[in-house]
Each structure stands twice: as C-alpha cells, then as structure tokens.
Amino acid sequence: MKKKKLLIIGLDGGTYTFMDPLIKEGKLPNIEKLINGGVKAVLRSTIPPITSPAWVTFMTGKNPGKHGFFDFFKYDIKNPDYYFAPAPQDALKKFVKNFMNSHNYAGQTIFDFLGQSGYKVASIFMPMTYPPWPINGYMVSGYPVLDFDKPTTYPEQWSKELGPIFDNSALLTRNKEKLIKECKRLVEKTTDITLKQLSKNECDVLALVYSSIDFSQHRLWLDSKEDASPYKNVISEMYAQVDKDIGRITSQVGEDTSIVILSDHGFCACPEKAFSLNAWLAQEKYLTPQKKNILANLNDRILNYLRHNKITTIVAARRILSKLPLFFRQKASSAYYKGAQIDWTKTKACRYKMGPCEGIVINKIGRQKVGIVAEGTEYNDLRDEIISKLETLKDPQNGQKIVREIYRREDLYNGNFVEEVPDIVIVLNSSYMGGLEVDGPIVQPVTDEFRDVYSGQHDLDGILILKGTKFKEKDDIGTVNMVDVAPTLLFDLDLPISTDIDGKVIYSAFKEQFASRQAKLGNISEKQFEEQEFSDQEKEKIEKSLRSLGYLE
C-alpha cells in the first residue's frame, strides 16, 4: 500500500498579527491558498512560550512536565539567582550539563515513531535537534547550534554536502544590516536544502523550519511600526520571501501529501513597562528586603542604569566576570539579579524568571537553603493567597490588569519534572515584562535602549494551518494546543498514537467521515540516548547566541 506523505513547514515565531494584514493585501498568496483549501487555527504555545519547550512539545506530543524542557537550561528553583549567571569554572561542567539538548528527549519524537512505522523522514533545521540523532532518514540540527557555518547532521557526512548555512555572529551584533543579510541567506539555504531533498524523492515525511522569522522579529519588530525606520518593511519582506518559497516547495508535492504550517509561539512588541514581582511581594509582606547601606544603594543605581541603558556594556562585563574566581562571580550574580537584597530568613516567596513569563518560588523548609514555610497547609494557603491577590492586581498608574493568567504548577504540568518548576506560574499581560526591583516601585517604564535591542518578544498565540484530503476546507477552528499537533498528524497518517503522550487528536480539523473514527493507540518503543556533555567553549557559543536574542537577561 502506498504511503500517504506529510510536509511540515515551521515558521519560528510566526504570528497572525503580522500575517493577516499581509494576506489581505495579497502579499502571501501561497499561505492564503493553503488556508482557503484547509483549516486555520490559533496554535496556543507552551507556558512559557519559548522555542525550547514549544518545539519539543510539538515533536513529542508531551507537556513540559513530562519531557522536562521549560527553557534552554534546566531550572534550579533552589537558587533564584542562578538564571544564566556567569558560571564558575569549578562548577562549569554542571552548568554546561544543564543546557537542554536533544539527548534529553531523542527517541521519543514523531520522527522516531514514523521511522518505526517504515516512513523515511527528513528534518531540516528543527530547533532543539542539536546534537542530531539517528533516525530513519536525514537530520540537520536547528537553532541553537554551535556554528551554522559547520552544520551538524545525521548522517554525519551530509554536513559536507550542505556547506556553510548562516553566520552566527549576526546574532551577536547590533548591526541590523548584517542580521537582515544573514536571515535572508538562511531562508534561501533552508529552501534549497528542502527542494534538493524533494527532488531525490527519498522521504515520505519532510519537516523544515524557517528560523529567520523569529530572528528578525526579535530585533526589528518596533522598526516595522515606525514609518521613518529604514527597516520598516524588513519583516514583511521576510514573510513574503518565505511565502514565495512555500509556493516553490508545495508545488513539488502531490495531492497525497498533507501540508502543515505551524509556529512555536507568536510575537508582540517588547512591552513598555516592567512589573517587578519581587517589589510587589515585598509590598505585600511576603518578601523582606535587606537594609542597604550607602555603598549598596550606589552600586544598585549603577547596575540599574547599566541593565536598562547599556546592554552592550553588560554583555562585555559578563565576559570579564567569566575569568574571575568563584567568590566574585557569585557576588556579581547575586548583585545583578538582586538576590543579595533579600533577607531570606524573613522571606516567604520570591520571583523566578521564566522567559517572557514569571514564576514564584515559595521559600519552603527542607527545599530552600533558609526555608521558612512549612509543607502542607501553610504552603498551600500561602500559594492560594498570593494567586488570589495577583489575579486582580492592577497597575497603580493606569488601572490596567497586570496578570493575564496564573497557575499552580501542578495545574499546568504533569510528569516527573513538575517539581523543577516554580510553585506559581504567571503569564503577564502583553503590556508588561518582568522586572528586577526588590524595594522600588512595582511598575517602571522600559527604556528605549532596551526596547531597541530586544524589540519583539514571544507571546502565546502561534499559527496552525492544515491542508490535506482528510482535513476540512476553508474552516477556522479557533484555538488549539501545541501538544495536540503530533497525535493529529499521526491520526491523519492512520498510524498508532503512543499511550504515553499527552496530546489529543484535533478531531474538529477533520471532515466528518474521518473525525468519527477512533484513533489507534499503541505502546511505541522509545530509544534512550546518553546525555550530551558540552565543553566550556561549546557552552559559550550557545549562550552567546541565546543572549543576543533576549532569551537570557
């Protein structure tokens, strides 16, 4: 029996906010054609809406509590200052090991399941696939990688055929011209590699991701809103270039091929205001600041200025700190993230950064170094009380709600990794980002300097388009979840769905005669791989590229 084929096209950071106006203007004709011939939905990302957990959730059909990816690094809720602080040399091995890589989940993905079922697969620049692992087909790792000029592939010899892909240094500079040039180059290379794979007609399933959408929106979102900016049309042109190439790619597949377009998260402008959760916790008497002397006050003012106005200075300072002894690194980290300003013996709860989201860690006896909150009733009552207050919290300056959504961690996630997450997880209103203040005002403006460097940020609402013989036509099915995409694609191919995954088939996307069928379930074997350990040089390269896009404070 002839296999049905599948084409998956990822637009990293793709958002209807940008796409819908372009579609109305007729500038994305190929995407518009797919929407008119298929199903459109808002694809709700993971919380937090970050590349790492979102794409891994797509590939595995599992929630972050089960696959363990919440960010690019493992969380350490015992240490609220840890968040990407400079790593001390004698702890570098542990820090590097905390970088989340494909070997934490390889063998559990839709690519592995398809290979077991006899499908040959090609995965091209799917994020979080570094290092590549053996599948029934081909894989070239996607962002973040050590060096796109030397792509890492399975099989290994494929790398020589691909040649240089992208200059990583474009992500480490404020030179927008260089970034634009390299983003366009990356689109071209992604398309060229995809078309070559299609011409060989070797693969039944082909997945590719255009990361240039994400890279350009991080740096140029606000430029796109400014008529006077010379870069006003860059993001629109990037979407148009990708749309044109989607047309070239889809013209090479047959009617028996289902086509999927999705993004890992949406995008929005960098907020104009910062909400400092620790300052609010102090205001509500859940956190007690340390008393500061004149020198500490001066030090904090200088650091505040550097954080918000001299981004490049801060990056340079981190490089210098990396060469200092452990004691000084720890002090610098605690000063930057303001942990030194907290009296832990009198603090019940503190802020924990979760990318574009916020977390709260309860200072629990037996878990934290100086825990003061008892497990059980005291812990549960404290969480409920904090959540109740934050649900209705309003900006004292304009009366706007600050919190969009708030969860107890176990209500949001399930699995072996839930206890790695902060006790409370918060999604802020899109007008606010997290701030670092401990004893200052709870809301402050974000500087123009900061917004220029980190112009756009992720939000929850991504895109999903499904087209194929089994899918409905010209139908908008509302909002669906990232975790449900993988089982939906397996159902479309009439393949069994592992009972271990969390996602459910999106039956509303299918024509009635197919939606009425029950999904096949099965226990699909999962191959385990040894965890990858990175050298300090490898870790430094990855950390630099992540920091350049605003993933690291």
Image (tube, grey):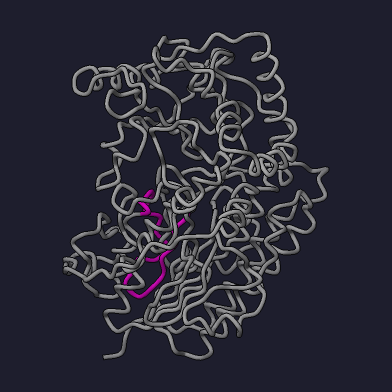
Magenta residues, start to end: 463-482
Quadrant of the rendering where the N terminus is positioned? bottom left
Image quadrant assignment for residue 381: top left
Up the image or down, 212 lies above or below 411; here it is: below
> Visible in this render: residue 432?
no
Quadrant of the rendering where the C terminus is positioned? top right
User: Is 541 contained in the magenta span?
Assistant: no
Q: Is residue 315 left or right of residue 227?
A: left
Residue 486 drawn at (x, y percent): 33, 63
Residue 70 drawn at (x, y percent): 41, 46
> Visible in this render: residue 305?
yes
Q: Is residue 265 left or right of residue 318?
A: left
Task: Name the main secondary structure of what is drawn in magenta.
Answer: strand
- Residue sitting at 67 percent across and 61 percent down? 168
Image quadrant assignment for residue 106: bottom left
Up the image or down, 207 lies above or below 73; here it is: below
Q: How many marks?
A: 0
Image quadrant assignment for residue 110: bottom left
Q: Is residue 104 left or right of residue 220?
A: left
Residue 309 drawn at (x, y percent): 74, 30
Up the image or down, 473 lies above or below 318; here it is: below
- Residue sitting at 45 percent across and 31 percent down? 80
Residue 400 drawn at (x, y percent): 52, 20
Q: Nearer the viewer, residue 319 or 164?
A: 319
- Residue sitting at 22 percent across and 71 percent down? 525
